Image (tube, coloured by chain):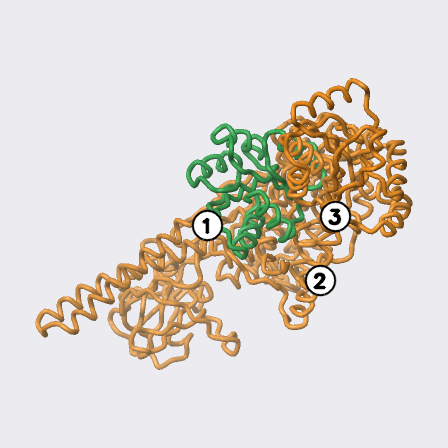
Chain colours: A green, B orange
Amino acid sequence: MAKSVLICDDAAFMRMMIRDILTKNGYVVAGEAENGIKAIEKYQETNPDLVLMDITMPEMDGIQALKEIKKLNENALVVMCSAMGQQAMVIESIQAGAKDFIVKPFQADRVIEAVRKVLE
Amino acid sequence: MDVSQYLDMFLDETKEHLQNLSDQIMRLEENPEDADTINEIFRAAHTLKGMAGTMGFTRMQTLTHDMENVFSEVRSGKLKVQSQIIDVFFNCLDALDDYVQNIQNTSDEGTDDHEDLIKRLNDCLPKEGQAVMPGTPYKKEQPAQPSVPEVKQEESQETNKWDEIELDEAIWAAIDEARADGDECYGLNIVIQEKCLLKAARAFLVLRTVGEKGEIIASSPSTQDIEDEKFDRDFTLIVISNLSLEEMIKAASNISEIEKVTGGVFLRPGERSASKASKPEAEPIKEEQSSKEQPAKGQEQPAKEEALQRSIPSAEAMEGTATTQAPSEADAKEKKSVSTGKHLGNKTIRVDIEKLDELMNLVSELIIAKNSIVAATQSGQMAAKSIVKDNIEYLERVTTNLHEAVMKARMVPIETVTNKFPRMIRDIAKKLDKKMELYISGEDTELDRTVVDELGDPLMHLLRNCADHGLETEEVRMKRGKNPVGSIFLNASQVGNSVVIEVRDDGNGIDVDAIRRKAVERGTITQEQSETMSEKELIDLLFLPSFSTAKQVTDVSGRGVGLDVVKSKIESLSGEVEVKSKLGEGSSWTIRLPMTLAIIQTLMVGVGGEKYAIPLGSIQSIETVHFGEIKTVQNKQVINLRGVVLPLVRLYEVLEVEGNRIQEEEMTVVVVKKGDRYAGLMIDELIGQLEIVIKPLGKYSKQCKFISGATILGDGEVALILDANALI
C-alpha cells in the first residue's frame, strides 16, 4: 500500500509543491497543516507513515510540534524542512528525534530521497 | 522541476506576505519592542525567502534573506529597532513589490540586485556579529583545524583516515575490553555530498544514527567541531559496536546526502601494516580527482566564505537549482513571445471551501429538479403539467440561490486594496512633514473581485488629495484651533445593492471661490455662468480633464490632481463620485458602486413598443402622474412630487423611438435617483420585475450614452438596459 505523508508548512504554495512531488512519486498525502498545532491535530487524525515538517510556522513552530508528536508516538517518522541558516534548529530537531531534513529551496529528488530513505 | 505551474499561487501568496509584512512593520513603528510583531516579520521574511528560492528567483531570495538576518538580530535582542531600520524595510518591501511586478508581467524577477538596499541592511547589523545568525555557524574560523590538512595528505597516501586518530591508553584499554566481550572497534570515514547545504546538521544526523548502533569513542574533528561545521566535507569516527562492519557502513550510507562511507577494523598502530582498508563502498573517489579538488577548494575558501556569510547560496550550492531553473526560464520566454497582455498568469481567486460546498449543493438541487421534469414528461398527461409547474418554481428558487452563491464566491473584501493605504499615508506624512492619521472602517465590505481590483488607484488619488491638499500644515491647524494631527477617514459600507465608500478629511475643504476665479480665468466658464452656478456645479468642474491637469489650480484651490481620472474610472465601473465640502471644516468624497456587474434585478418597461430594463437599484418609486401636474420651469418640464420638484424625462424623445406622443390624462413615471438627485422617467407601460444577465454591447455601441448594456429575454428578444445615472 502506498505510504501516506502529512505535509506541514505555513505557505500554501509550498504545500502544493510538495504535494505534487509526493503524489507524482506514488505517495499518498494524508493531510496538510499550516501550523504546528494543526500538524499535531492532523497527525492524530490521519496517523500518517511520515510527517514533513517545516520549522518556521506560526502558532507553534515545527520543532515544538515534532516534540509533541514524538510524545504521542515515539516511533513517529518526521522529516524536517528548513532553510539555509537554520542549522542550529535542524540539529535541535534531530536531537528531538527527526529522522532527516531537507533544505529549501527544494529539489524534487531530494524530497523523494529523504522520504524514501526514512520510510525504508 | 518545472515550477512555472506554481507561478500564480506563488504570486498570490507572496502578495499576501508582503501585505502582512507592511502591516507588521507599521505596527512595529508604533511599538518597536513588541516581540510578537518582530517574530511575525521574521517569519514572513523567512517564508518569502523559501518561496522565492524554490521558484528560482535568487535576487528576491537574497534580499529576503538579508531582511530575515536583520530581524533575527532584532529578535535575539542584539539589535534595537530604529527608524532607520523601518525605513530600510519599507524600501525593501518596495523593491520586493517591484520583483513581484516583474515576475507577474514577464515571469522573471528582472536584473536589479538592489545592492544599495542589501548594503543598508548589512549596515544595520551589529558590527561584531556580522551576518551571523544566532547559533548558526555560518562563519567558519579560519584557519581551520590544523589536523585537516594532515588528514588530506594521508588520503593521498592511501592510508586509512581513522589511523590518523591517536588515542589515549585508557581508551585503548576500553577497546580491548570491548573486543574481549565480543564487540568490535571500527574506523569510519564519512564524506558528505558537495551540494549539501547544512553539513553540520547532516553530520549530526550521522553521529546520531551511528551512535544508535554503537558507541562513538573518538572522532576527527571533535564532535563539537562537527556540530559547529568546522570540517570540510568528511569526518572520521571510531566506533565500538556489536554489529558487523558492513552493517555499520550501511547504516551510515543510508542517510541522505552522504556521498561515501569507508570503514575498517580499528587496530593499534603496531598491528596495522598487514591490514588493508576494506572499502565496501561501490564508488570510491579517484585519488587524483580528490587531490586536485582539494587545493582548488582551498583557494575558493575565502570567496565562498564571504558568499556564505552573506548567505547567497554559492554557485556550487545552487548547482541543482540552476539546472531546474533552465526549463522554467525557457518556458517563460516562450510565454513572453506568446502573450501580449499585461498579466501572464490567469487571474485567480481563492474561495472559501464552504462557498464551494454551497455551490455544489445547489447544483445537485438543479439536477434533482431537472430529473423531476424529465420524469414528468414521461408520465401521464394530467399529472405532468402540475409537476412541471412545481418544478419550475423550484428551479427558479435554485437558480436565484445559485446566482447568489456564485456572486459570493466572486466577492472579496475591499480590505485587499485598503490595507496598503496606511503605509502610503505614512510615507506621505513623512514627505510632507504633516501629522496625520488614517482611520479605516468597514474594510470587510465585499465587492466583486473585478471592481475591487480597479478601485485601488482612484481611492489612492482621493486619499493623496486629502493628505496633500486637504489637510493643513500643523501650524495652520493649531492656529485654527484644530487638532494638530489631521484625520483622514475611509469608510466603506453596503447600502442596498450598492457599496458606498467615503473618503473624508478634516482639513481646509474646497475653496469654491478660488475655483470660480480660476475657471473664469481659464475660460472654462464665462463670468455670467460663474455667477449663476451653484456651489455643487462649481465643485464638479474639478472633475473636468482640462481643469484638473492645470497645476496652478492645485496651488490655489488645493484640489484637482487627476480627479478626472478618478471619475472616469469609477464611472467605468458603473459607479459615481460625489463631493461635499465645507470651507475650513474639510471635504468628503463619496464613491457609490454596484455590488456586482453581472446579474441585476430590473424593472422592465415599454417605451414606444420597445422593451427597456431599468436597474431596480436606481429606482426610487413608480408614480402615476396626472397631466395637469406637469409644470414648466426654465423651459424644462417638472413635476412636484410630495414637495420635491423633479425634472421629467420623456424617454421616447431621449431614446428617439416612436413613443406614445399623444398626451393622455394620466401617465406612468418611474422616479430614479442618483445620490440625492431625482428624475422622473416617462414611460408607456410597466411590464414587471425581472432578473437579467447583463451583456456588454461591444465597442461599437460605446456612443450610446444612456444605455449601459443589453440582455436577452426569455423569448429570445433583446432588451436594452437604461443607465439611469446618465439620464439625470
Residue indicated by mark 2:
B326
- What is the number of the mark on residue B195? 3
Sequence-first tag of 2 and 3: 3
Residue indicated by mark 1:
B446
Q: Is residue B634 above or below residue B317?
A: below
Label 2 Cα neighbours within 10 Å, binned few <14 / some 14-19 / many ≥20: some
Between marks 1 and 3, how big is the CA–CA gap?
A: 49 Å
Between marks 2 and 3, how big is the CA–CA gap?
A: 18 Å
List x then y, in percent, for residue B207: 69, 32
Mark 1 and mark 2 in contact? Answer it, CB < 8 Å: no
Label 1 Cα neighbours within 10 Å, binned few <14 / some 14-19 / many ≥20: many
Sequence-first tag of 1 and 2: 2
Q: Marks 2 and 3: same chain?
A: yes
Quadrant for the C terminus of chain B, please. Answer: bottom left
Q: Residue at x 21, y 63 (%)?
A: B393
Give the side of residue A5 with respect to residue B373, left or right. Answer: right
Amino acid type of the residue that numbered disc 1 sits on in the rendered structure: Glu
Sequence-first tag of 1 and 3: 3
Amino acid type of the residue that numbered disc 2 sits on in the rendered structure: Ala
Seen from the viewer's position, the closer of residues B353 and A54 is A54
Q: Residue at x 63, y 65 (%)?
A: B342
List x then y, in percent, for residue B237: 75, 32
Q: Chain of mark 2?
A: B
- Residue B92 appears in the figure: no
